[in-house]
Amino acid sequence: QVQLVESGGGSVQSGGSLTLSCVASLRTRGGYCIGWFRQAPGKEREGVATMDINGTPSYADSVKVRFTISRDNAKNTVYLQMNDLSPEDTAMYYCAADLSAPPGTCAWYSEHYHGTGGNLGAWGPGTLVVVSS
C-alpha cells in the first residue's frame, strides 16, 4: 500500500517562495516515478516536476528555473521548492507516483501529462497554494 501526504501549501505574494513536502511510503521492486502535479480552478490537472528512481528530475516548461524537485531518501520525502511564484501558479498541488515507470519515462509526466494517460496509481490529498498579486 502506498501512502502520499503533502504539506507546505499556503498563501504568498507574487515573487514569494514556498516549499512543499510529500512523505511517501513507496514499496516497489522496480522503477518508479514520483512527482508534483497541480490543478487550477477550471483547468486540467498537469504535471509540474517529477523524479525517477535514479533521481533524474524533469520539469514542465512553465516552472523550469523557478521550481526544484528533490528528495531525502532517509526521510522518505520529496520536496518541491518553488521560487518567484506568480498568480498563475495558484492551484491545488498533488504528490503522485507511478510505481512501474522505468527510467527514461518519468519525464513524460512533467512534460506532457494533462489529466489522462500514464499509470499514476497513488495520489496524495493535495495541498493548496495561493499566490496573490
Image: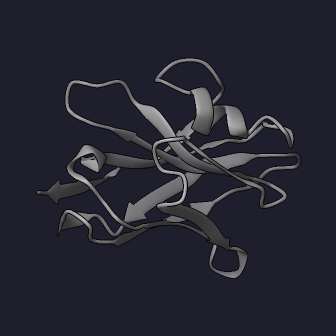
Q: Which residue is found at the position 68% from the left and 31% from the top?
A: 108
Whether residue 98 is visible to the viewer of this picture, yes or no, is: yes
Whether residue 125 is visible to the viewer of this picture, yes or no, is: no
Q: Which residue is found at the position 80% from the left and 50% from the top?
A: 28
Report the residue that reaches farthest toward the bottom.
74
- The image shows residue 8, relative to residue 101, as above or below, that is below
The quadrant in which the C terminus is found is bottom left
Total labels drawn: 0
- The image shows residue 86, relative to residue 121, as above or below, that is below
Q: Which residue is found at the position 53% from the left and 41% from the top?
A: 61
- The image shows residue 132, relative to residue 97, as above or below, that is below
Q: Position of residue 131 (x, y in %)?
A: 19, 57
The image's colour scheme reads one colour
Q: Position of residue 29 (x, y in %)?
A: 88, 49
Report the residue that reaches farthest toward the top.
116
Q: Which is nearer the eye, 110 or 52? A: 110
Q: Position of residue 49 (x, y in %)?
A: 56, 49
- The image shows residue 18, relative to residue 95, as above or below, that is below
Q: Which residue is found at the position 54% from the left and 59% from the top?
A: 65
Judged left or right of residue 18, residue 63 is: right
Q: Quadrant of residue 43?
A: top left
Report the residue that reaches farthest toward the left.
133
Judged left or right of residue 11, residue 106 is: right
Q: Position of residue 119 (x, y in %)?
A: 65, 27
